[in-house]
Image (cartoon, helix red, strand yellow):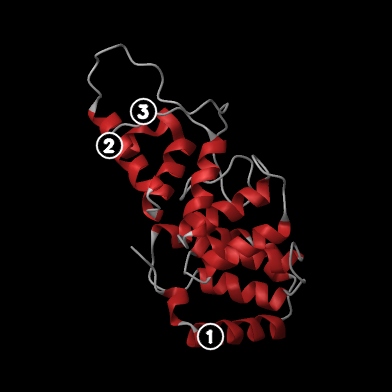
Amino acid sequence: GVVYGGWVGSGDSGGGEAAPSTGSVGPQPKNKAPTEEEKKFAEIMARAKANDAEAQFELGERYYIGKMGAGRYGGNPVEQDFQEAFKWYLKAAELNHPKAQYEVGLEYAVGNVVEEDNKEKVKWYRKAAEQNVPQAQFSLGSAYFFGDGVEKDVVRGYAWQTIAVSGDRTVDGAVAELDFKRWKTHHSRMTKEQIDEAKELAKEMIAKNPKLIQRKK
């Protein structure tokens, strides 16, 4: 995906598809010393198995991008494997890692390696949205707009999307801003009263929880 890895075929994010593999580093010749990237990967794996959420999230990212994205980490010794990616994203999400929570929600929206489930999608989007992940906030707003996994509420949907494009500008927020512009047609179907109400609701939500727009650079 554009920001956090994302899942192939998602309407919320993008990404090119490649066939999943076993995700293994592959057989090594006997007595061959491990490369620096293999050592680093082993260290991350050890931390992840010790319940380090950040390491688990990085493993999810590494398995998602595979060797194609090696430049992102200065080398990545594993093949692309969406099943493994989701496994580690979920572990990190369960330890309250916000970006991992967004990725889990995105997978439930797409149904790449798990069955599509709008209620699970909304559950994980909400967890990430409440921890100021802009794309999760926007996606949660979209769910409210269409009544996907939650009762339809265009006012609350617009409020969440407004929150997504509020606060300090970040790369993640810039993606949400583009999404907001693309939603012009949907927003145009709302009345002025609905939009005004949504903007007020967004202000109230931010006042109640200022962390909603405290972006991490």
Q: Tag 1 or tag 2, which sits nearer the N-term?
A: 2
Residue 84 lies left or right of residue 146; in this view the side is left
Q: Which mark is residue 70?
A: none
* Mark 2 crowd level (few <14, some 14–19, many ≥20, 10 Å Cα): some
Does residue 1 appear anywhere in the picture? Answer: no
Question: On the image, which quarter does residue 125 sit in?
Answer: bottom right
Seen as rendered, the residue at the extreme front is 50
Q: Quadrant of residue 76?
A: top left
Q: Is residue 138 visible?
A: yes
Q: Residue at (52%, 69%) from the top-left corner?
A: 164
Give x and y (percent) for residue 81: 52, 32
Q: Is residue 17 above or below residue 85?
A: above
> Whole-Å distance between the Cαs marked 3 and 1?
46 Å
Left or right position of 106 against 214: right
Q: Residue at x 54, y 25 (%)?
A: 21
Q: Provide residue 212's location: percent of width, then percent of height.
A: 47, 75
Using the image, determine if residue 36 lies above or below residue 177: above
Answer yes or no: do the residues labelled 2 and 3 have beta carbons within 8 Å?
no
Q: Secondary structure at mark 3?
A: loop
CA separation in Å, label 2 and label 3: 10 Å
| Image quarter in which the C terminus is found | bottom left
Q: Which numbered circle lies on residue 203?
A: 1
Q: Nearer the viewer, mark 2 or mark 1?
A: 2
Q: Which residue is mark 2?
A: 40
Number of the front mark, 3 or 1: 3
Q: Residues within 10 Å of mark 3 (few under 14, many from 20)?
A: many
In the foreground, 102 or 182: 102
Classify residue 93 as left or right of residue 146.
left
